Structures are given as structure tokens and as C-alpha cells.
């Protein structure tokens, strides 16, 4: 059980920012939020999808991308170590092992521990290729390859975390799979659009929390990134009952939430939906996680 020696519940911080094509400026904004999170006593800080940058077009996205061993991740390693907290880096534009052949990247959710070591990576498996009237068309696959697999949930000081990214939240099979594999916290770092945001964002996040009986943490991009792109914001933490227990206000900033795993366990006992499933009717997502 993730309770600190003083008996207090672990505190997590959800960071919201407006990434631009300027990587250095974005790092500065993120590191200030992370330092603030550490000062406020968080053991884990969540940064949104595209915390590293949001580019103007696919060519610029590819040009600005780096491998996991590059300078930018090096800076985050140092930051985690200095601040002594864990970091969920919600969507790093990653040049993978296959970069030389493919010239495409992965949208990689990287989890660092408080020593700055990479403890897990998950590469976004559902890419957002959508054209919604009133919103800039999105074609993530023009620069990005879909990840090959899900990642088993990882133990952290706040609980066992299942990794996902943004558009993945629309696929409940993925969240059920992570919950079945032991996740207590699901994460959806995001850069949500302005048309789908008001209609779907909170409903999807609360539905994922209620049906899996997990905490859901969603750090979001907000505001105008450049002349062609803006994001919905509304970063939040939802508890396993479906209550929004923390939300960011408008603009860059952070919010905090306590993670109460005893409450989660009690809720799962009182309302044991996972024992009431009917895999005979619809299958059981039986393919094991790695
Ligand atoms: O482009 C980057 O650099 C980083 N990636 C993103 O911002 C991605 C792909 S365009 N955005 C989403 O998945 C939004 C999903 C969404 O808005 C919805 O599901 O309604």
C-alpha cells in the first residue's frame, strides 16, 4: 500500500501548459511546474502529451524529435533527480530504434523514477487521424507510427500506474486490459481538441474511472500553441467513484490530488463489477500483457 512513513496519503500533481515549437521555453515552463509540485509535496508529477513541443507541421515535428537518449530526456532525468519525484512525461516525440529506416517517430509516454531512471515506456497505440468540422484536421500518422504493445502497470509511490496517451481514452478495451493487469491509476496525458473537448473529455475520463474503478489522471495541453493549433485544457484527476477530485483552472498551472488506495479497495469490494463480467458473452480480453 502506497502510504508514506508519516501515514499521509501520497499526493500527485497534474501539470497543464501551452507547449509551442520552442523546446527550450517548454522545458522551462515544465520544470517550473515540476519544482512547484515538489515544493507542495507531490511524489509524482504528470506532464501532458507533447510536453516537449507542439510543432506547426509534420516536417517540423520530425525535425524537433529526439531519441530517448537525447539531450531533452537528459534534462528531465536531472530534474527528477534534483526534485526527488517521479515524472510521467506524457507524450515524447521519440525517434525510435527504427528512425533511420522509417523516418517516423513514436508518441512515447515515459515514466521516470525519483532518481531520473526510465522505468517504463509506452508508445501510443491508437493514432488520432480525424477530421472533425470546426477543428483543424489531425493526421498523427503522417509523422508517427503506432506502438506495438501495451505496457504492464508499474508500481510507483502513488500506486500501480497503467500508461496510455490521449486518443487511447476512446478505447475502453485498453483501460479494462490495464485494470485487469492490476492498474490502480490510469493516465491519459492529452492535447485534446476544442470541438471534441467540451463534448467528450470529462465524460470519457469519468467513464474510464467508473468502469475500471481506477483513479484517472489526465494532464492536458491548454491554450494556443501557434497560429494553427489550440487545446482544450481541463486537466483533472477522477477518483474510482467517478468524482472529479482535482482540476486545473484556465491556463497553465497545476492541481493536486491525494491517491487513496484503501478507498479504491473498499469501493471494489462494495461494487465488485470485475467479478460480474460475462466473458462467455463478449470475450475476456484474454491475451496476456507481455
Ligand atoms: O501532435 C502532436 O505533436 C502530439 N499529438 C497530439 O496532439 C495528438 C495527435 S494530433 N492529439 C490527439 O490525440 C487529440 C485527440 C482528440 O482531440 C480527441 O480524441 O478528440
Image: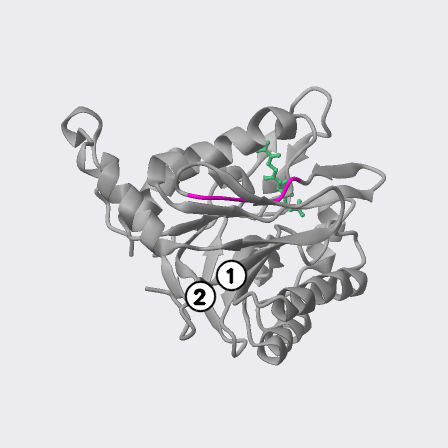
- Label 1 sits on residue: 11
When asked about the image quadrant of residue 87, the answer is: bottom right
The residue furthest right is 227
Furthest residue in direction top, as rendered: 133
- Residue 223 x/y as whole percent: 77, 41
Disc 2, disc 1: CB below 8 Å?
yes
Ligand 1 resides in the quarter of the picture at top right
Viewer can see residue 149: no
Instruction: Using a 10 Å C-alpha cutoff, classify the residue at mark 2 as few (fewer than 14 neighbours), some (14 to 19) or many (20 or more).
Output: few
92 shown above or below 244 = below
Judged left or right of residue 207, residue 199 is: right
Q: Position of residue 224 (x, y in %)?
A: 80, 41
Tell me the residue that label 2 is attached to.
8
169 left or right, relative to 84: left
Q: Is mark 1 within 8 Å of ligand 1?
A: no
Element assignment for label 1: strand
Foreground mark, 2 or 1, reads 2
Local SS, label 2: loop
Q: Which residues are magenta?
A: 234-239
Relative image position of residue 105 (x, y in whole percent): 59, 54
Q: CA distance from mark 2 to mark 1?
A: 9 Å
**Residue located 76% across and 61% down the image:** 29
Q: Position of residue 38 (x, y in %)?
A: 62, 69
Residue at (62%, 66%) from the top-left corner?
40
Instruction: State the residue in front, 229 or 35.
Output: 35
Amino acid at each position: 500500500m502506497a502510504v508514506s512513513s508519516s501515514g499521509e496519503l501520497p499526493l500527485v500533481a497534474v501539470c497543464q501548459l501551452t507547449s509551442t515549437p520552442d523546446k527550450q521555453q517548454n522545458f522551462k515552463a515544465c520544470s517550473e511546474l515540476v519544482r512547484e509540485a515538489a515544493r507542495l509535496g507531490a511524489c509524482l508529477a504528470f506532464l501532458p502529451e507533447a510536453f516537449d513541443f507542439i510543432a506547426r507541421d509534420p516536417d517540423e515535428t520530425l525535425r524537433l524529435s529526439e531519441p530517448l537518449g537525447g539531450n531533452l530526456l537528459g534534462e528531465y532525468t536531472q530534474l527528477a533527480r534534483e526534485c526527488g519525484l517521479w515524472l510521467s512525461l506524457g507524450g515524447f516525440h521519440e525517434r525510435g530504434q527504427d528512425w533511420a529506416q522509417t523516418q517516423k517517430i513514436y508518441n512515447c509516454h515515459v515514466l521516470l523514477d525519483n532518481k531520473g531512471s526510465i522505468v517504463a515506456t509506452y508508445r501510443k497505440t491508437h493514432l488520432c487521424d480525424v477530421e472533425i468540422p470546426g477543428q483543424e484536421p489531425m493526421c498523427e500518422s503522417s509523422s508517427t507510427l503506432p506502438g506495438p504493445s501495451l505496457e504492464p502497470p508499474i508500481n510507483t509511490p502513488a500506486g500501480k500506474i497503467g500508461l496510455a496517451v490521449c486518443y487511447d481514452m476512446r478505447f475502453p478495451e485498453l483501460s479494462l486490459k490495464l485494470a485487469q493487469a492490476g492498474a490502480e491509476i490510469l493516465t491519459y496525458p492529452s492535447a485534446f481538441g476544442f470541438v471534441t473537448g467540451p463534448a467528450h473529455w470529462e465524460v470519457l475520463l469519468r467513464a474510464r474511472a467508473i468502469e475500471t474503478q481506477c483513479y484517472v489522471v489526465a494532464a492536458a495541453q491548454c491554450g494556443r500553441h501557434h497560429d494553427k493549433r489550440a487545446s482544450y485544457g481541463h486537466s483533472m484527476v477522477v477518483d474510482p467513484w467517478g468524482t472529479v477530485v482535482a482540476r486545473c483552472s484556465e491556463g497553465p498551472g497545476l492541481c493536486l490530488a491525494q491517491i487513496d488506495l484503501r478507498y479504491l479497495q473498499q469501493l471494489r469490494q462494495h461494487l465488485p463489477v470485475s467479478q460480474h463480467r460475462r466473458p462467455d458473452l463478449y470475450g475476456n480480453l484474454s491475451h496476456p500483457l507481455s
